[in-house]
Image: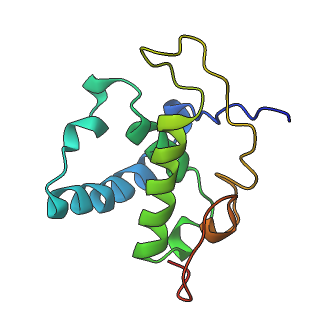
Amino acid sequence: GTHQRPIYVDPKSLDPEVTESLMEKVLGVYNRKGLDTSVLGSDKGMTPQKKAFNWLATNENLDSLDHTQLMQRYTLAVFYYATNQVSTPYTEKPKPWISAHLWLSKSHACEWKGIVCNDQDH
């Protein structure tokens, strides 16, 4: 099959108003769950969490997503960036995913290849 390279977003292209509001929401979840917020800091470089955040900030329909949909998309994007064409101690030149049909698209996350949701689309 054809490999699908990861999608990257230039942080300089993001709207500061959007990123500020979105960061408050994401950090709120990190803090409530006791997660390490430093992975979203600028001093950590381009972590999977930061790449997912940048991608999410480019979503045109951001305002129409409820909290669960927002976090669902963010979490799946973190997974995508953490596993798609990522070097490890065991793989120096990893290949991109073979199929990422609808991943990081405008489609509902429940439609992304390999994702199964319940009746409430969660």
Kindly identify the residue that appears in the image at 29 percent across and 25 percent down: 44
Q: Residue extending furthest right?
A: 1
Residue 16 coordinates in the image, percent (x, y): 42, 46
Left-right relation of 100 to 26: right
Residue 55 coordinates in the image, percent (x, y): 54, 45
Q: Is residue 15 visible?
A: no
Q: Nearer the viewer, residue 71 or 62?
A: 71
Residue 72 versus residue 17 in the image, above or below? below
Residue 48 versus residue 25 in the image, above or below? above
Left-right relation of 6 to 22: right
Residue 43 coordinates in the image, percent (x, y): 26, 24
Kindly identify the residue that appears in the image at 58 percent across and 50 percent down: 58
Residue 115 versus residue 8 in the image, above or below? below
Kindly identify the residue that appears in the image at 23 percent across and 56 percent down: 30
Q: Is residue 114 visible?
A: yes
Residue 116 versus residue 120 in the image, above or below? above
Q: Residue extending furthest top?
A: 92
Q: Nearer the viewer, residue 113 or 48?
A: 113
Left-right relation of 22 to 77: left
Left-right relation of 67 to 113: left
